[in-house]
Each structure stands twice: as C-alpha cells, then as structure tokens.
Image (tube, rainbow, N blue to C red):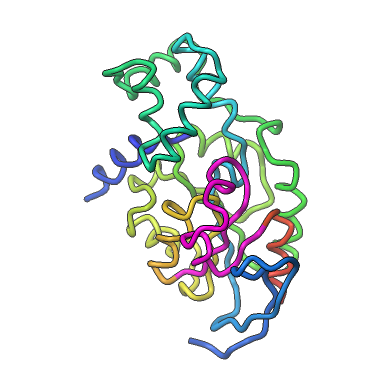
Amino acid sequence: MLLKSDQRNVSQAAQTGGPRTCGVGRSTGGEAGFVLFYAAHMIRTVVLDVGETLIQDDRGWAAWADWLGVPRHTLSALVGAVVAQGRDNAEALRLVRPGIDIAAERAAMEAAGVGEQLSESDLYPDVRPALTALRETGVRVIVAGNQTTRIGELLRDLALPVDAIAASGEWGVAKPDPAFFVRVLELAGTAPGETVYVGDHPANDTGPAKAAGLRAAHLRRGPWGHLWSGTAEAAAADWQVDSLHDLAQIAAS
C-alpha cells in the first residue's frame, strides 16, 4: 500500500485515430444498465489500478493501526475523514502520531516481521474470473498502480491472469504524475485512445489518465470509489462500472 506521501517522494525521485466503432458501457450520466456509445478507437489494452481496485486495503491499514497502538476502527475513520477533506491519506497517521517519519516506521515494521503482506484473501472476489474473461476478449491486460516495490513482488507471486504488473515504486514515478501514464503506455505498447485505465479514485486514476489521452473507467468500489461516485470528477470518466466483470463487455464491444 503506497501512501500519498510515498507517491510524492517517488515522483520527486523520478525527475530523473482510427475508425469509430460502436461499443457498450455504463453511462457516465448515471442511468441504470448499459447504453451504446461510440468509441474513437478500439480497445487494445486495459490497465488496472491496484488498491481498492484489485486488492482490499484493509490489511495494510490494520497493520498500521496495530503498529501505532490504536484501534483499527479509529485509524480507518481518520483515513476516511482526511480523504473526505481532500487531504493526503498519510495525514491520518500524522494525526495519530504527530511528526511520524513514515519511511522509517515502514522500515521498522519490515524489520519486525510485520511489513507489507499480500495473499489471495486480499483480492476482491471478481478479480481472477474478471481478468480471465478480459484476456479472452483478446486485449492486453496490465496491472499498474501506486504501490511499493514489495507489493509489486507480492502481486507477481499471486500469478494473476495478466500480461504485466508494474508498481510505482519500481518505476520511480507515481500517479497522478503524467510521467506515470507515459510509463503505462510504454508498457502497454498501444496508443492512448486504445488504452483504458481502470481505478476507483478520480484524482489519482481516471482524471490524470484522461489528461494523458487514455480512456478511463471509474470503479465504484472501496471508500474512494463510493465517496467520489456521482461527482463531476467521476462522471468525466468514459465509463462507470460497479464490478470488474463489466470490463470484458466493454472491451469486446
């Protein structure tokens, strides 16, 4: 799990037209069901965010709560509060422990054997069947999100049905930095208009993806997906989806 403070550090370290086709997708206007739309390009690659798109972040925040000695619900509520205020999610940790050195504490957690972990139980139930169905449509499927190098390694250990996995910690650049989406397109090997980015957070995922020329699907999942649902920011995405199962229908249309 990469905190927004980690994202900034990663980004700073890095400062190193085709035919129209008819498709199917959930209306961004909020109507129920699926409606027809016209896409400027065929979809050739679908790229998915990680936290609260593929995996539930419960374990990561629970580990922080236990490490800092506060009830898990307390930290969870603080995370929700600071995010609702438009603040960095790491501010929740600073409210619990003012002046905390997050990088140092993360290293101490690893040394104590309570560092980042990831297993099959952390995946949302629709992940494997939905990604399998998505690949069967013939599109390239990639996972790329704001995660540490360690989480990238753990994701690969899960042997997900995808073509590639990348973490911002490995790339040295994190969302919403436009350079992150440059790396996404390099990995995808497809044009921006042929590439869809799927995520739960408009400010980190769908908004900057659209700004980079990609298409975007906003996923109503997790605290950020639900919080932003129905907002103008979420509506700016090309599609609104409630499940990863919707993606195969979008890609195949």
How far across and how far down the image is residue 156, in percent? Answer: 59, 40
User: Residue 94 occupies which quadrant of the picture?
Assistant: top left
Q: Nearer the viewer, residue 251 or 74?
A: 74
Taking the image as shown, residue 5 lies to the left or right of residue 157, namely left
How far across and how far down the image is residue 39, in percent? Answer: 58, 81
Query: Could you tell me which quadrant the C terminus lies in?
Result: bottom right
How far across and how far down the image is residue 195, in percent? Answer: 53, 69
Q: Which residues are magenta?
A: 214-241
Is residue 183 placed above or below 193 in the rendered structure? Answer: above
User: Residue 159 occupies which quadrant of the picture?
Assistant: top right
Is residue 208 placed above or below 192 in the rendered structure? Answer: above
Taking the image as shown, residue 66 lies to the left or right of residue 99, namely right
Whether the magenta-drawn stretch holds residue 219 is answered as: yes
Q: Residue furthest bottom?
A: 19
Taking the image as shown, residue 182 lies to the left or right of residue 72, namely left
Whether the magenta-drawn stretch holds residue 148 is answered as: no
**Badge count:** 0
Taking the image as shown, residue 134 lies to the left or right of residue 111, namely right
Name the residue: 64% across, 80% down: 37
How far across and how far down the image is residue 220, in percent? Answer: 62, 51
User: Residue 223 occupies which quadrant of the picture?
Assistant: top right
Is residue 211 placed above or below 49 in the rendered structure? Answer: below
Name the residue: 47% across, 69% down: 214
Name the residue: 70% across, 33% down: 120
